[in-house]
Image (cartoon, grey):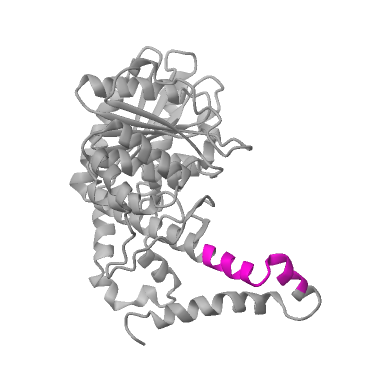
Amino acid sequence: MSGPDANGETGSARERSGSAEGGVELRDRDAELLESLLAGDHRALARVITRIEERDPGYRGLVSALYGHTGGADVIGVTGAPGAGKSTLVDKLAAAYRERGDTVGVVAVDPSSPYSGGAVLGDRIRMASNVGDMDVFFRSMSARGQLGGLSMATADAVKALDAFGKDVILIETVGAGQNEVDVVRTADTVAVLVQPGSGDDVQTLKAGILEIGDVFVVNKADVDGAERALAELEEMVHRREGSTATPEAGAGHHGPHGGGVPDAVDADDLDDADDPDDSDDPDDSDDPDATDDLDAADDEWTPEVLGTVAETGEGVEELIAAFDAHAAHLRESGELARTRRRRYAEEIRTLVRADVGALAAEAIERRGGIETLADRVRTGETDPYGVAAEIVDPIAACLEADDPDGE
């Protein structure tokens, strides 16, 4: 079936081999491409990311095969309002990582073209300090209309870079302000950039984007207003620490449940939320997730606040030290494992929603299309609830027949 995938992009949404493990078929030519990527061929890496971005037929098998080779990279998201200096800072960060011997992958997300859907600024040269360095792989990708600035293709491209063996992967978001929270679903560490000058920058950044920051950076720290911005951020972090002092209060990126995004919660948590008797459930004391939450509350990360001057590289070394400290915290506290479990849960939900939606769209087309169904409602032949049941009931029946418990 060719249908919309998780981002409404054209692609194969049902390329499954039907294996016992429920895996996705890896085509022969893709297996060769994967082998080249794992062998360190940068051209193969570029081709894989292109196939991922364009959602070519078979890309799902390719991405599925990448998973077993991921998990070794530190993934860092750099977000903030347009004009904060994200591109320049990412450039300097990449150069600094290279100086200490790390290999670097950069995914720079640009706004989508309203005509082609591709990256509006896809060909711009943003990595001036790293031109010619093969161990810095730069890729500009389209946001593909995603409000949060990151499409599923971006997350899949990060997996390709991770599987390739890049030590550090930097994600530069499109810079749409408070909608930039999606980066927390892909990056292990998130840096939020603020620029001084307007005087109200910190005050205008509300809960959403502030809750996802592991490190807050006042870039252009050599201009007037920088000290004030640093002080406001320090105060904001202090207030937030106070508000998340208890497990119940910590709903943000650094709270017990982490994530910082309402959808990025554990499926078990959703089940619990629907259970009116949850608070009285005696089994909660045996819930390992509950223990994890308490442990996470004890080991909560306090965001660092730093100043940088990206143009000169001032403060970049200290920023990398902050990233390293957060990465160490994630590993030592167990938060990295919890974060990745939440991430995989969200990816599963996203893919399942997209695939079920594609199946429903096919069923609508087989019945003459949505306009035909609307006319049936208009003439009184049926109603929207009846149409929805007509579309969804066969899918539900198939799921019931496939019940692993046989009930």
Q: Is residue 364 magenta?
A: yes
Q: Residue drawn 23% across and 72% down?
A: 286
User: What secondary structure is the magenta-colored segment mainly?
Assistant: helix
Which residue appears farthest toward the front when viewing the image? Answer: 28
Look at the image and tell me whether residue 267 can be seen.
yes
Look at the image and tell me whether residue 245 can be seen.
no
Q: Position of residue 9 (x, y in %)?
A: 52, 50
User: In the visual, does 36 lie left or right of 370?
Assistant: left
- Decide: is 372 above or below 183: below
Which range is magenta? 358-375
Give the quadrant of the C terminus. Answer: bottom left
Labels in figure, total:
0
Q: Residue drawn 42% across and 24% down?
A: 218
Give the image quarter of residue 315.
top left
Q: Nearer the viewer, residue 53 or 214?
A: 53
- Decide: is 271 above or below 190: below
Q: Nearer the viewer, residue 134 or 336?
A: 134
Which residue appears farthest toward the right when viewing the image? Answer: 379
Q: Residue drawn 21% across and 37% down?
A: 39
Q: Position of residue 123 (x, y in %)?
A: 49, 25
User: In the visual, does 384 lie left or right of 402?
Assistant: right
Q: Position of residue 326 (x, y in %)?
A: 26, 37
Q: Nearer the viewer, residue 124 or 233?
A: 124
Q: Position of residue 16 (x, y in %)?
A: 37, 63
Q: Residue drawn 42% across and 17% down?
A: 221
Q: Is residue 301 magenta?
A: no
